[in-house]
Amino acid sequence: MDSFEQFLKIRIVKKHEDGVTISLPLRQEFMNNAGVLHGGIIATLADEAVGFAVDFHFKRKQRITTTELKVNYLLPVKGKRLSARCYLLRVGRHLCVGRVDLLDDSKRLVAIATATYMLLGPAT
């Protein structure tokens, strides 16, 4: 886990055969002026979930980067924690696509996302 993920306090909850579940504790600094979670934090967690899933799929032997991210925000988020369950939909030679379900601490589906990652070559 890199320093960005450590700073956010992202935690790996479970590795799945087809992806990963991660979570993030919510902090006051993450809330917007309306008192709900900032959309950028939700997008970040979705992006991180796909990144972890791709990393684990390739046993961290590939360098990767995001090429596309789309988020649909369904409900405002309050509470103490946000979790993200990524499903890898396609793992190709150059691109990987994942879908993410984002859930609040009441297990409500608050957002869905898709992200595409590009494989940049072997990790050094």
Image: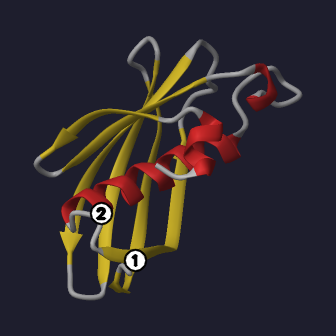
Amino acid found under the numbered disc labelled 1:
Arg
Residue 69 image offset from top left, x and y in percent:
52, 65
Identity of the residue drawn at 29% across and 55% down: 53
> Is 122 on the left-hand or right-hand side of 80?
left
> Considering only vertical position in the picture, is 49 above or below 93?
above
Residue 62 image offset from top left, x and y in percent:
32, 76
Q: Nearer the viewer, mark 2 or mark 1?
A: 1
Q: Which residue is mark 1?
A: 63
> Is 113 on the left-hand or right-hand side of 13?
right
Identity of the residue drawn at 40% across and 73% down: 117
Q: Which residue is mark 2?
A: 54
> Considering only vertical position in the picture, is 110 above or below 56?
above
Q: Nearer the viewer, residue 118 or 71?
A: 118
Label whose residue precedes the other's in the sequence (2 or 1): 2
Residue 98 image offset from top left, x and y in percent:
32, 60
> Considering only vertical position in the picture, is 123 above or below 102?
below
Residue 10 image offset from top left, x and y in percent:
51, 35
Number of numbered discs on residues: 2
Q: Tell me where residue 115 sits by quadrant.
A: bottom left
Amino acid found under the numbered disc labelled 2:
Val
Identity of the residue drawn at 73% across and 36% down: 38
